Image: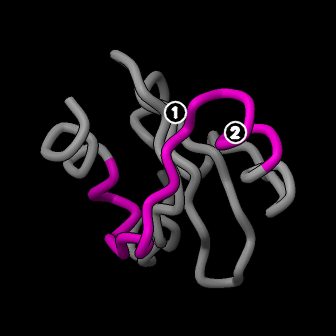
Amino acid sequence: MEGDQAQQSVRIRATSPGEYPILVVELPSGGLRTVYFETGYDLGCSKSVEEDWLFENAVGRHSFVEVDPPVETPAKSLGDYVRRELL
């Protein structure tokens, strides 16, 4: 993860169930990204998604769980959040 991205705070908006959770995070700029267990939740390896996708596809079809209210955390701590809250 690049230094600037690692230092920024993100808001966790949704999580997937399972052994290798996927997170949907909101960047400070407002964009949404999916981050993956396999990449250590590296924002540099994330995939950009839209708000509609979050609710229609992830939550609506793939059993993601909305985090309400969203949890704000430093991007470099996403793996810690998963270990503490999801695994």
Q: Is residue 25 left or right of residue 81?
A: right
Q: Position of residue 59 (x, y in %)?
A: 65, 43
Q: Is residue 75 above or below residue 8?
A: above
Name the residue that disc number 1 marks.
36
Name the residue that disc number 2 marks.
58
Q: Which residues are magenta?
A: 56-78
Per the rendering, the mark at residue 71 is none
Whether residue 42 is visible, yes or no, is no
Q: CA distance from mark 1 to mark 2?
A: 14 Å
Q: Nearer the viewer, residue 63 or 38?
A: 63
- Assign a secondary structure to mark 2: helix
Q: Nearer the viewer, residue 40 or 30?
A: 30
Q: Is residue 68 above or below residue 43?
A: below
Q: Are marks 1 and 2 in contact (CB under 8 Å)?
A: no
Q: Amino acid at mark 2?
A: Ala
Q: Is residue 31 magenta?
A: no
Q: Quadrant of the C terminus?
A: top left
Crowdedness of circle 1 by 10 Å Cα count: few (<14), some, many (20+)?
Answer: many
Mark 1 or mark 2: whose residue is earlier in sequence: 1
- Assign a secondary structure to mark 1: strand
Q: Position of residue 32 (x, y in %)?
A: 70, 62
Residue sitting at the far top: 19
Crowdedness of circle 2 by 10 Å Cα count: few (<14), some, many (20+)?
Answer: some
Q: Amino acid at mark 1?
A: Tyr
Q: Nearer the viewer, residue 51 or 72?
A: 51
Q: Nearer the viewer, mark 1 or mark 2?
A: 2
